[in-house]
Image (cartoon, helix red, strand yellow):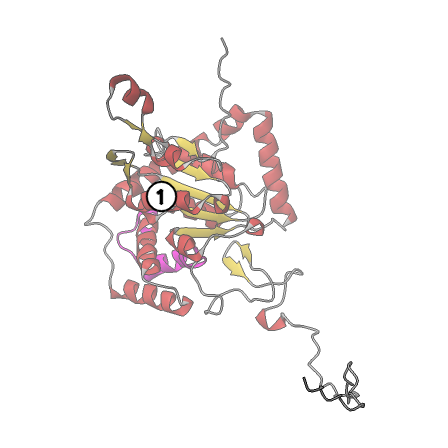
């Protein structure tokens, strides 16, 4: 008889160093799972999986479910229990991964490589909190309220704009270029690998405070009468979305919900324009048109720093106007006369013979 290997203990969320935009986006999605999840873009080795797994531990009794790339639609949404149907001639629903993830975190690594059908079902359930199955003679619906966290490396392909828009928040991670910050991250990871329990004990108090704040914020968001806001909040949201030239009104709605979740996390009495400004980049990053205000220049890929997007070049300096530095202006080119071509078949010089009469 073989026993299952114990699951590795997760890295504490409170011990994650750097990446403030990632931490904020994950916490907001945990406060209000109805935001539609978080899409994390970035290179390999930037703690995407570590942060998602650590978030699940802050939620009391929350499961952490991983959707593999080779999963089928039936394994995701659920299907007919064939064993029960064949044995007792009874139609019974067999739950899928969406049911298992209810109340927890559903993590999808390299979500851009999933088939569109799976992504559609995933995003529908993440936004509505309900999974509806109408197939194989079964009509079933169940709660599917979870925090969706999807990661992708843009070098391996992107999602269609229609799917990108349905993610609530998006964060672009960067390679750490500050030597002191890199050293702090590496030291923390090595200390955790050597003594996971001892490392977790050092951060236990901070973890407990985060979990308690998360419970309080979720309760505040659930109160419909809490966190009022005025016309200035609406005006700020509209101005930001119009400047980014987003399609539709989903960005406006998500920005308001995100600002409300942030206000609940802060324990504020009302939503302010400052809350809107603090969540705007995560809401607009994947919805903003390339030529809109605030978009990264086309000459170089955008990089993420602690405060948001940056259009800096590889040297860490410059601006959008410096993208074509050193380029030479076009010069006119002269036109050379070409010798006319001669036909390949020579013209007939001999007179044609007249046909003889029959």
- Report whether 147 appears left or right of 50: left
Q: Quadrant of the C terminus?
A: bottom right
Q: Residue 81: within the magenta?
A: no
The magenta stretch spans which residues?
263-286
Q: Residue at x 69, y 81 (%)?
A: 330
State the image quarter where residue 60 is shown: top left
Determine if residue 32 is in view: no
User: Which of the two residues, 155 or 51, is positioned nearer the viewer here?
Assistant: 155
Q: Residue 270: say if magenta.
A: yes
Give the prevailing secondary structure in the magenta stretch.
Answer: helix
From the viewer's perspective, tell me whether residue 66 is left or right of residue 337: left
Tell me if mark 1 has few (under 14), some (14-19) or many (20+) residues whose alpha carbon lies within 10 angstroms of its own.
Answer: some
Q: Is residue 140 above or below residue 290?
A: above
Q: Position of residue 144 (x, y in %)?
A: 30, 37
Q: Judge whether residue 166 can be spotted in this image.
A: yes
The residue that disc 1 covers is 121
Q: Position of residue 340 (x, y in %)?
A: 77, 88
Q: Is residue 151 left or right of residue 319?
A: left
Choose top left, top right, bottom left or bottom right for residue 80.
Answer: top left
């Amino acid at each position: 008889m073989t026993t299952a290997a114990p699951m590795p203990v997760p890295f504490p969320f409170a011990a994650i160093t750097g990446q403030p935009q990632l931490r904020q986006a994950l916490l907001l999605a945990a406060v209000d799972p109805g935001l539609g999840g978080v899409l994390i873009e970035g290179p390999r080795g930037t703690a995407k999986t570590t942060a998602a797994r650590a978030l699940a531990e802050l939620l009391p009794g929350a499961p952490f479910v991983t959707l593999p790339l080779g999963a089928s639609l039936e394994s995701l949404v659920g299907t007919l229990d064939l064993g029960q149907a064949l044995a007792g001639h009874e139609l019974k629903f067999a739950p899928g991964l969406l049911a298992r993830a209810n109340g927890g975190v559903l993590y999808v690594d390299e979500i851009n490589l999933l088939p569109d059908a799976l992504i559609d079902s995933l995003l529908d359930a993440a936004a509505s909190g309900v999974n509806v199955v109408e197939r194989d003679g079964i009509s079933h619906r169940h709660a599917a309220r979870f925090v969706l966290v999807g990661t992708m490396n843009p070098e391996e392909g992107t999602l269609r704009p229609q799917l990108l828009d349905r993610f609530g928040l998006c964060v672009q991670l960067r390679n750490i270029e500050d030597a002191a910050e890199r050293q702090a991250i590496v030291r923390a990871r090595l200390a955790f690998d050597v003594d996971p329990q001892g490392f977790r004990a050092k951060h236990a108090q901070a973890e407990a405070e985060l979990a308690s704040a998360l419970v309080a914020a979720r309760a505040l968001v659930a109160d419909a009468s809490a966190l009022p806001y005025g016309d200035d909040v609406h005006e700020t949201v509209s101005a930001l979305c119009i400047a980014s030239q987003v399609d539709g009104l989903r960005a406006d709605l998500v920005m308001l919900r995100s600002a409300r979740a942030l206000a609940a996390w802060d324990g504020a009495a009302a939503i302010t324009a400052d809350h809107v400004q603090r969540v705007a980049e995560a809401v607009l990053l994947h919805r903003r048109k390339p030529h809109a205000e605030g978009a990264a220049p086309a000459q170089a890929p955008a990089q993420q720093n602690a405060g948001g997007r940056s259009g800096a070049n590889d040297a860490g300096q410059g601006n959008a106007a410096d993208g074509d530095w050193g380029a030479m202006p076009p010069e006119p080119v002269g036109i050379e006369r070409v010798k006319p071509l001669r036909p390949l078949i020579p013209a007939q010089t001999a007179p044609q013979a007249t046909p003889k009469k029959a």
